Amino acid sequence: MSSLYENLRQLITVIDELRDVGLQKYISLPRIVAIGTQSSGKSSLIESIVGRDFLPRGGGVVTRRPLELRLVHLSTQEYKANDAWAVFEKVSDKKYTDFEQVRAEIERQTDVVAGANKGIVNDPIVLTVYATDAPDLSLVDLPGITRVPVKGSDQTEDIEKLTRDMTLHYIQDPRTIILAVLPANQDMSVSDALQLARQVDPKGIRSIGVLTKIDIMDEGTDAGKMLRGEEVPLKYGYVGVKMRSQADIVHRKLVSDALGEEKAWFDNHRVYSKLPPGLVGTPVLIDKLTRILFKSMRRFLPQIKKEINEKRISMQDRLDELGVGVPVEEAERVQMLWTLITDYCEMLKNTIRGKYDRKLQRYMVHVPNLGPHPVSGGSQVRG
């Protein structure tokens, strides 16, 4: 198991470094993206995975920019048991050991880009969290799908379309694992998260479902069928989680204490205690996400390497076509100009003699006033 996590850390580091240099704009990279409606419990789930209380709280929409979260597990042999800190990409010279300050910085960066009046913008915040109790994972938390704009805010009337389009933008990539978060106390057949996931992943081969609010379902009902995948099947199945209630959050209950209560609650539940292993609990979800991400990265890395090489060769060919840079010295510039003129004359002579020269055609394409059908050098001379 330790070798799995060690290999995963190496793979995540490689993928994150590729993402940092902007490769994601040209080649898709594996990642996990958490989607769900507003107030589906997505932010609480992320905090349970991280093991820290650090995300903005409040009424209405609180996640207003995508949060690209990179978790790095610290060895307990090298660090103390509760060692943890965070680093923002745009404030990389500062270590945040107080996670209340992390929350404040997320809010500040959100307000700078999206405004302080509840606006939503597709410009991710990149945050890396180092902790001894954090898993090695990399995931993106998106703003929840919002149906109605908040009165008096900067949100437009098409807020639902905006949040849906943003979600689709992230999950349509076939190398993205979709973490669909849905409340267990709502009918999953009308779940926005599952609907969007099935839209881009109709067979459910890269989706995993998480059932939140499982502890506040109507009395006499349970999520047994949903967890077993009997209603809407997904390749990676479903995991049920019990998170902190609003009262727990107000009274600042530690995430670690809540995880202990979650385990006891599932162990003593009349239905969930009898389910097969691997269907309930935040630790189960973390282990499943870790394995899924590892397999995804290992599967796609050879293809990514091939695509990078193809792009590199293509760009090198283009650079070779452009030739060397313009010389600085005047004598060298004169020599370069005469060389270009000589080459051009030679290409034109070759064309007149019936020797096709591909380089000449590139020149002719950029010559103005040739009409919709550019002609070759030779046919121009004859004309």
Image: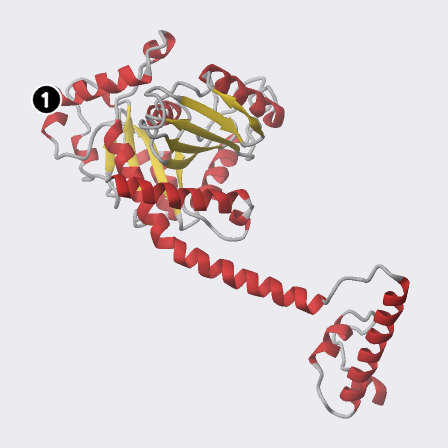
Q: Look at 32% across and 18% down and name the residue there.
A: 255
Instruction: Determine whether, in the image, residue 335 is placed left or right of residue 217.
Output: right
Q: Which SS class for mark 1?
A: loop
Q: Position of residue 360 (x, y in %)?
A: 75, 78
Q: Is residue 353 above or below residue 123?
A: below
Q: Is residue 198 above or below residue 76?
A: below
**Quadrant of the rendering where the C terminus is positioned:** bottom right
Q: Position of residue 339 (x, y in %)?
A: 83, 75
Colouring used for the render: secondary structure
Instruction: Determine whether, in the image, residue 90 is placed left or right of residue 340.
Output: left
Q: Position of residue 146 (x, y in %)?
A: 46, 28
Q: Is residue 293 among the parts visible in the rendering?
A: no
Quarter holding residue 157: top right
The amino acid type found where label 1 is placed reads Arg
Mark 1 sits on what residue? 270
- Which residue is the extreme one toward the top? 251
Q: Position of residue 322 (x, y in %)?
A: 71, 66
Q: Residues within 10 Å of mark 1 (few under 14, many from 20)?
A: few
Q: Give the number of marks.
A: 1
Q: Is residue 57 above or below residue 294?
A: above
- Which residue is the extreme one toward the front? 78
Q: Look at 30% across and 50% down and name the residue there.
A: 203
**Quadrant of the rendering where the N terminus is positioned:** top left
